[in-house]
Image: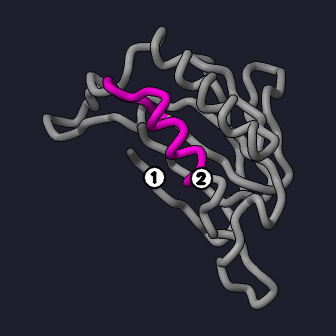
Amino acid sequence: MRLLVQRSGNAKCVIGDRTTGKIDSGLVVFVGFTDGDGPEQIEYLAKKLVNLRIFPDENDVMNLSILDYGGKVLSISQFTLYADCAKGNRPSYVKAMKSEESTKLYDLFNEELRKYVEVETGEFGGDMEISLTNIGPTTIWLER
């Protein structure tokens, strides 16, 4: 399981003419799964994410988690986090978990996050347009 985490001002996910998720401040999290991922990885990375100290404290030091700072999470499924470009110029996605299994884990991940913070989402398998303002910029890679 892989997470690409970005500290964000405003962010939203649009599919066609409808907005499926929108936050004013918090984290945008791109989520990918591979074979062997399950509830253990989800629980571990959800806790790691909400306790990640990447928000500024009163001294402008990244010392606060989203639990301390406030804000929401915009969670976006992204199988391309498992792209492999080692053999040529066309990425291979064979390491990405198949859609049916991955959908269930994505829903489970969002349920786990909702135990701690408010979560907005994209739409699994949708042709999504993601816009965000990366604050810092701060981008963190989490994997388990």
Mark 1 or mark 2, earlier in chain: 2
User: SS at mark 1?
Assistant: strand
The residue type indicated by label 2 comes to: Leu
Residue shown at 56%/41% (left/top)? 30
The quadrant of the picture occupied by the N terminus is top left
Which one is in front, 130 or 72?
72
| Label pair 1/2, CB-CB below 8 angstroms | yes
Residue shown at 45%/37% (left/top)? 41
Q: Position of residue 65 (x, y in %)?
A: 69, 65
Which segment did they paint magenta?
A: 32-49
Tell me, yes or no, whether the highlighted magenta stretch contains residue 36.
Answer: yes
- Within 10 Å of disc 2 (Cα), the crowding (few <14, some 14-19, many 20+) is many
Residue placed under numbered mark 1 in the picture? 142
Drawn side of residue 8 relative to residue 37, left or right:
right
Which one is in front, 30 or 16?
30
Drawn side of residue 131 relative to residue 17, left or right:
left
User: SS at mark 2?
Assistant: helix
The total of numbered circles placed on residues is 2
Q: CA distance from mark 1 to mark 2?
A: 8 Å
Drawn side of residue 20 relative to residue 131, left or right:
right
Residue shown at 76%/90% (left/top)? 59
Q: Position of residue 110 (x, y in %)?
A: 66, 31
Which one is in front, 117 or 140?
117
User: Where residue 49 is drawn, which disc sits there?
Assistant: 2
Residue shown at 51%/31% (left/top)? 78
Look at the magenta stretch and give its main secondary structure: helix
The quadrant of the picture occupied by the C terminus is top left
Looking at this rendering, what residue extends furthest in the top direction? 100
